[in-house]
């Protein structure tokens, strides 16, 4: 799964193709159907969008454990506003805004007080989960989606092939990749992740960049939460427990370094799709859930080990 530094997505792509072909051989009658590929792409959208934001955080040298809680809180905020009579897109934008605000707070605590990102986001993970339960009175909020479920449903026009959520994931990924690789802000993110002290000496506003990165990442988690609401059609404060692990794993599998300074949005999306392929493939061949978890865990550890070995060789 290793790849040249300027092509970190190559390893995940090779792994994805090999795993896909393996399951095609094991279950050719069902797994190889085009409809199954379209379904897997749709199932990847929530993790893929959140992984685009997480890529920025990890390249910065940080981590965000509150993603799953932010997604759950967003579903509750959207459902609550819809129940109160708000327009669907107003509710969706409000959900994204609330998530973005939590990211701003996380970034401010990390940048302003110097608290370790792991501790800050571990705390916010619990706070946001509790806030979601409190807002929902510890129960699901059933409400008419107002058409937001159309984001995750099969397209109304056959020529679109994929659901709007998949196209949204690709658009977010492309935009984030351009932001990271083609802008001054992106270069500052990479510089901070490589060496915060050097970046500061070079005149980069480390605190401002850090706050903005966490805000953008949380906003994308909120967008993923809107899709999750469309899929669930309810506001669920207990949803997406452990989602942050899938998101972080996608970035690491895609070539992101937990030491900071390296990461690929394209690789993260491929990593997210790879995990979906593994889960779906195991289901098609009749393997139990625990096997899926073991395989996914092995892939994550392998990806991190490869990253460490690559850094040692440098």
Image: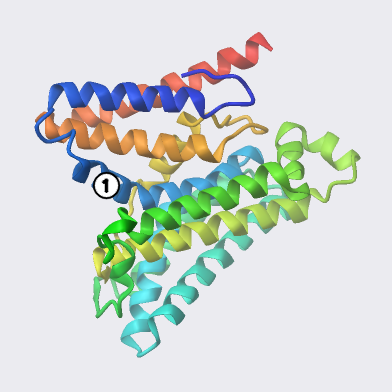
Q: Is residue 229 above or below residue 167?
A: below
**Does the image show residue 106?**
no
Q: Residue at x 14, y 22 (%)?
A: 26
Residue pushed farthest bottom? 85
Question: Picture coordinates of residue 187 (x, y %)?
Answer: 75, 42
| Badge 1 element | helix
Are there few (<14), some (14-19), or many (20+) residues within 10 Å of tag 1?
A: some
Q: Residue at x 56, y 54 (%)?
A: 217
**Which colour scheme appears in the figure?**
rainbow
Q: Quadrant of residue 163?
A: bottom left
Q: Of 7 and 185, which appears nearest the observer?
A: 7
Q: Is residue 164 left or right of residue 171?
A: left
Q: Is residue 264 left or right of residue 249?
A: right
**Does the image show residue 216?**
yes
Question: Picture coordinates of residue 101 (x, y %)?
Answer: 58, 67
Question: Picture coordinates of residue 248 (x, y %)?
Answer: 46, 39
Q: Is residue 188 above or below residue 77?
A: above
Residue beneath disc 1 = 38
Q: Is residue 309 above or below residue 237?
A: above
Q: How many marks?
A: 1
Question: Picture coordinates of residue 92 (x, y %)?
Answer: 43, 74
Q: Residue at x 35, y 90 (%)?
A: 85
């Amino acid at each position: 799964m290793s790849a040249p530094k300027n092509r970190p997505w190559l390893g995940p792509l090779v792994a994805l193709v090999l795993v896909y072909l393996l399951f095609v051989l094991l279950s050719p009658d069902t797994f190889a159907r085009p409809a199954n590929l379209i379904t897997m792409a749709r199932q990847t959208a929530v993790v893929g969008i959140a992984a685009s934001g997480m890529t920025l955080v990890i390249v910065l040298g940080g981590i965000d454990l509150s993603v799953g809680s932010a997604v759950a809180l967003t579903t509750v905020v959207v459902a609550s506003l819809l129940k109160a009579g708000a327009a669907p897109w107003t509710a969706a934008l409000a959900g994204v805004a609330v998530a973005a605000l939590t990211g701003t707070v996380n970034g401010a605590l990390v940048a302003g007080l110097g608290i370790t990102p792991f501790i800050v986001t571990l705390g916010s993970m619990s706070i946001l989960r509790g806030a979601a339960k409190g807002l929902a009175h510890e129960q699901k909020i059933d409400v008419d989606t107002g058409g937001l479920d159309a984001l995750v449903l099969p397209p109304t026009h056959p020529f679109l092939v994929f659901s709007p959520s998949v196209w949204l994931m690709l658009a977010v990924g492309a935009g984030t990749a351009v932001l990271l690789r083609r802008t001054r802000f992106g270069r500052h993110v990479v510089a901070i992740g490589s060496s915060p002290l050097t970046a500061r000496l070079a005149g980069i506003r480390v605190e401002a960049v850090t706050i903005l990165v966490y805000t953008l990442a949380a906003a994308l988690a909120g967008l993923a939460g809107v899709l999750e609401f469309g899929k669930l059609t309810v506001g669920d404060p207990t949803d997406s427990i452990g989602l942050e692990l899938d998101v972080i794993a996608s970035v690491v599998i895609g070539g992101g370094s937990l030491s900071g300074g390296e990461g690929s949005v394209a690789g993260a999306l491929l990593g997210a799709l790879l995990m979906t392929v593994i889960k779906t493939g195991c289901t098609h061949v009749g393997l139990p859930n625990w096997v899926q978890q073991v395989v996914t865990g092995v892939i994550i550890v392998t990806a991190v080990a490869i990253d460490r070995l690559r850094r040692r060789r440098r």
